[in-house]
Image (tube, rainbow, N blue to C red):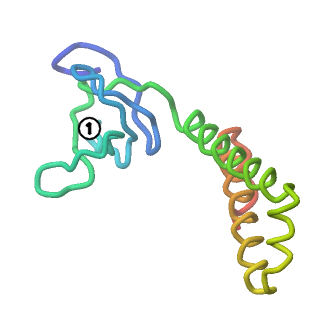
């Protein structure tokens, strides 16, 4: 229970999506401190005083908007959209022909990037659904 407001707060976790209660600014929890406060990376990207990337905010000023599972689903969704866009591009005759003209190292680099996108989406989905038995790799 928070001493100042008398409110019960759900403990924050790394990756939680939050907003500042009095400004509505949205961000992501990057670190949680023992007192319940958290280091937040704000979405607006505005630099913090002293050039810090994150701002430490007291718990009573933070409202959770989505937990880590929702954030992981968002990540997976973005990766799958990227993969779909690249697949659509490569299915075009012109792009497929251009890909065929690349040397093997260039093709392997592209396939490696695609594999990374797939693995990122797979890991995010497993994490979001609690299926973290396998190592990410």
Q: Using residue 95 as the reference point, say whether residue 7 is left or right of it.
A: left
Indicate the position of residue 68 as horizontal and vertical percent values: 53, 38
Indicate the position of residue 40 as horizontal and vertical percent values: 31, 42
Tell me which residue sits at (20%, 56%) in the image: 52
Q: Nearer the viewer, residue 55 or 47?
A: 47
Q: Residues within 10 Å of mark 1 (few under 14, many from 20)?
A: some
Q: Using residue 93 as the reference point, say whether residue 54 is left or right of it.
A: left
Q: Nearer the viewer, residue 32 or 30?
A: 30
Q: Indicate the quadrant containing the C terminus: top left, top right, bottom left or bottom right.
A: bottom right
The residue indicated by pointer 1 is: 37
**Residue 24 in which image quadrant:** top left
Tell me which residue sits at (21%, 20%) in the image: 22
Tell me which residue sits at (70%, 44%) in the image: 81
Q: Residue at the left extreme?
A: 50
**Residue 102 in which image quadrant:** bottom right
**In the depicted structure, whether residue 68 falls above or below residue 124:** above
Q: Nearer the viewer, residue 69 or 26?
A: 26
Q: Disc 1 on helix, strand or loop?
A: loop
Indicate the position of residue 39 as horizontal and vertical percent values: 29, 45
Indicate the position of residue 4 as horizontal and vertical percent values: 16, 19
**Residue 95 in which image quadrant:** bottom right
Q: Residue at the front extreme?
A: 94
């Amino acid at each position: 229970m928070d001493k100042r407001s008398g409110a019960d707060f759900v403990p924050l976790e790394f990756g939680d999506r939050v907003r500042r209660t009095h400004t509505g600014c949205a961000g992501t929890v990057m670190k949680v401190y023992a007192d319940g406060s958290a280091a937040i990376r704000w979405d607006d990207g505005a630099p913090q005083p002293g050039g810090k990337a994150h701002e430490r905010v007291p718990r009573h000023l933070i409202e959770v908007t989505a937990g880590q599972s929702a954030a992981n689903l968002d990540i997976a969704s973005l990766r799958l959209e990227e993969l779909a866009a690249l697949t659509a591009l490569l299915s075009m005759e012109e792009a497929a022909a251009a890909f065929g003209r690349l040397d093997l190292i260039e093709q392997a680099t592209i396939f490696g990037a695609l594999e990374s996108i797939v693995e990122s989406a797979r890991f995010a989905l497993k994490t979001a659904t609690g299926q973290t038995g396998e190592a990410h790799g």
